[in-house]
Amino acid sequence: MNELGVSLRSETRVYEAEDPDDPLHAGRNHVDSKYDIWVKKNLSEILTVTVSGRYRIRKTESAYDWVTDLKSFYQLQFWCKMEWDLIYDRY
């Protein structure tokens, strides 16, 4: 293993709808948290592989339960990236 990384991030969003009768946005807010981890390995001088994952949680608050249920979620993602260090000279 050549590199190990961890990232934590939390974002808060508050909506200010122009129309108070807009139940999807009026008075709604959410906290979106993301937890990332990755491992990078150099397999050779020109080939690198990175495996990463993310766990994401969005918790929504609204006066309407259906909006809270619609906009809140949990998500798990995984990626695998392969990089080749190639030289291309165009004359």
Image (cartoon, helix red, strand yellow):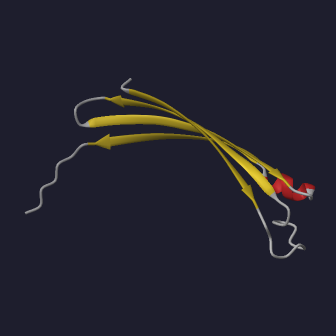
The single residue placed furthest to the bottom in the displayed view is 19
> What residue do we see at 36% from left, 29% from top?
41
Q: In the picture, residue 39 is in which quadrant? A: top left
Residue 53 drawn at (x, y percent): 55, 37
Q: Is residue 90 toward the left or the right of residue 58 in the image?
A: left
* Placement of the C terminus among the 4 image quadrants: bottom left
User: Could you say which is closer to the camera, residue 56 or residue 78?
Assistant: 56
Q: Is residue 73 above or below residue 41?
A: below
Residue 73 drawn at (x, y percent): 75, 47
Q: Is residue 39 toward the left or the right of residue 43 in the image?
A: right
The single residue placed furthest to the left in the displayed view is 91
User: Could you say which is closer to the camera, residue 46 or residue 23?
Assistant: 23
Q: Is residue 86 above or below residue 91?
A: above
Q: Is residue 61 above or below residue 18?
A: above
> What residue do we see at 22% from left, 32% from top?
45
> What residue do we see at 81% from left, 66% from top?
25
Residue 55 drawn at (x, y percent): 64, 38
How many numbered circles are shown? 0
Q: In the picture, residue 26 is in which quadrant? A: bottom right
* Placement of the N terminus among the 4 image quadrants: top left
Q: Is residue 58 toward the left or the right of residue 64 in the image?
A: left
Residue 33 drawn at (x, y percent): 67, 43
The single residue placed furthest to the top in the displayed view is 1
